[in-house]
Image (cartoon, rainbow, N blue to C red):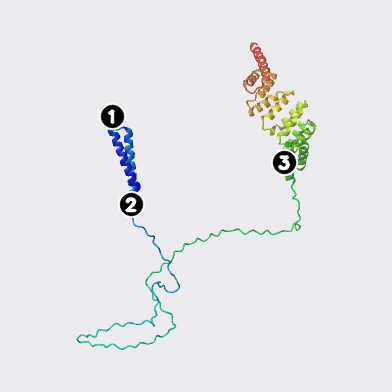
């Protein structure tokens, strides 16, 4: 309360000061209104007074409000016997004196009066029986005990006992592979060694593969390729000839062996070999090689059919169109030769060094056609 009084007195003093100031300003300025500084000060003072009143009101209300007493509950007394409140003493019915109420001796008409009998005080008899406890109607409140959740048993796997075996009891023997399995193993190891650059070991493993499985096409092809790269043409020729004998449907052996014959300059032998294996061929490269071999033999006209078979597989191959034009020109089939040369020049994959050769041949063919037309 002292604080509130001081604040109120302070407010009053400030109001007096403000009124004095207003009077002075009104005298000096005439009818000039209250400045904004004075208005803001008044608003601040009103807020402070409102806050102080709220604090005072809250303190007075809290003092007048009654105290809240916390309820206390006594712990129930539980036992195996009947419940008896602690304030009721245990009474022995044998020693307790009984008070007999007096009878009404005033009898009405038609009724008899009963005289009270004289009672003599008897000595208390000691009994060995337990005192009787009077039951009460008060309900026994059982204490609430929180239920504790039983821990969940997790299933644990018992360790499996592994029976110890005597290593000497069994005879360890290596598994014997079949020839096919061994050949497959040797070939796989040969490819690994070949990728590592160990050509000698790779050749040895490939030879072992062919000794176990003579019809292994991939192993024979790889071995022949190694021989050709190392310029061992005689070993490559023997390997490929054996492949043609054992696997005659493998056209790759005819193809590679025919190329070896052509590099040796034996076009007739290459042409005969490649023609015998053409029934198994399913690629344009094979027929193009056959046409090139036939082109350099007396029966060069048969190359026309071979070039056309090759172009059926790859119709945009410019080199084969150029070869077909050369064979047609050699056969003096000028119109078809002109068409083949023009197709070769129109294709995009014709090498630059062959453009001039193809153009000159096309000019020559056109001149021959012009001469024939004049006749």
x and y, in percent, of residue 91 in the image? 39, 78
Q: Upstream in the sequence, badge 2 or badge 3?
A: 2
Give the camera-side residue of 231 and 307: 231
Q: Upstream in the sequence, badge 1 or badge 2?
A: 1
Which of the labelled discs sits on residue 60, or is there none?
2
For numbered disc 3, what is the local secondary structure?
helix
Of tags 1 and 2, the one toward the viewer is 1
For numbered disc 2, what is the local secondary structure?
helix
For numbered disc 1, what is the local secondary structure?
helix
Up/down of 309 relative to 141, above or below: above
| Residue denoted by label 1 | 28
Residue displayed at 33% across by 51% down:
60
Instruction: Look at the image and tell me whether residue 33 can be seen.
Output: no
Q: Are marks 3 and 1 in contact (CB under 8 Å)?
A: no
Q: CA distance from mark 2 to mark 3?
A: 103 Å
Q: Quadrant of residue 210?
A: top right
Q: Quadrant of residue 182?
A: top right
Q: How many marks?
A: 3
Residue 40 is left or right of residue 191, and the answer is: left
Q: CA distance from mark 3 to mark 1?
A: 118 Å
x and y, in percent, of residue 192 in the image? 72, 39
Of tags 2 and 3, the one toward the viewer is 2
Q: Are marks 1 and 2 in contact (CB under 8 Å)?
A: no
Residue 230 is left or right of residue 25, and the answer is: right
Q: Quadrant of residue 130?
A: bottom left
| Residue denoted by label 3 | 188
Residue extending furthest left?
Answer: 109
Up/down of 139 relative to 110, above or below: above
Q: CA distance from mark 1 to mark 2?
A: 47 Å
Give the camera-side residue of 108 and 101: 101
Residue displayed at 72% across by 41% down:
188
């Amino acid at each position: 309360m002292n604080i509130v009084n001081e604040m109120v007195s302070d407010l009053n003093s400030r109001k007096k000061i403000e009124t004095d100031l207003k009077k002075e300003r009104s005298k000096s300025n005439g009818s000039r209104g209250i400045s904004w500084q004075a208005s803001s000060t008044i608003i601040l003072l009103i807020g402070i007074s409102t806050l102080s009143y709220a604090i005072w009101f809250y303190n007075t209300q809290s003092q007048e409000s009654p105290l809240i007493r916390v309820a206390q509950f006594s712990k129930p007394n539980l036992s195996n016997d009947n419940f008896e409140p602690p304030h009721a003493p245990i009474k022995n019915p044998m020693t307790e004196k009984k008070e007999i109420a007096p009878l009404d001796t005033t009898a009405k008409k038609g009724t008899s009066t009963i005289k009270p009998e004289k009672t003599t005080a008897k000595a208390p008899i000691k009994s060995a029986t337990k005192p009787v406890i009077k039951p009460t109607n008060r309900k026994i409140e059982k204490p609430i005990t929180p239920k504790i959740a039983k821990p969940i048993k997790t299933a644990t796997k018992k360790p499996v006992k592994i029976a110890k075996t005597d290593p000497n009891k069994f005879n360890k023997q290596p598994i014997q592979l079949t020839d096919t399995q061994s050949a497959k193993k040797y070939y796989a190891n040969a490819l690994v060694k070949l990728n590592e650059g160990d050509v000698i070991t790779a050749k040895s493993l490939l030879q072992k593969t062919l000794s176990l499985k003579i019809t292994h096409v991939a192993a024979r092809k790889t071995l022949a390729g190694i021989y050709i790269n190392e310029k061992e043409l005689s070993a490559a020729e023997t390997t490929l000839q054996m492949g043609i004998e054992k696997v005659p449907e493998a056209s790759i052996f005819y193809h590679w062996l025919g190329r070896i014959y052509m590099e040796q300059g034996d076009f007739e032998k290459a042409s005969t070999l490649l023609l015998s294996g053409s029934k198994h061929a399913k690629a344009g490269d094979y027929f193009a090689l056959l046409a090139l071999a036939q082109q350099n033999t007396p029966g060069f006209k048969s190359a026309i059919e071979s070039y056309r078979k090759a172009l059926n597989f790859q119709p945009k191959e410019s080199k084969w169109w150029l070869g077909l034009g050369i064979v047609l020109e050699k056969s003096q089939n000028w119109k078809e030769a002109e068409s083949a040369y023009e197709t070769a020049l129109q294709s995009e994959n014709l090498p630059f060094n062959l453009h001039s050769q193809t153009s000159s041949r096309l000019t020559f063919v056109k001149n021959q056609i012009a001469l024939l037309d004049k006749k």
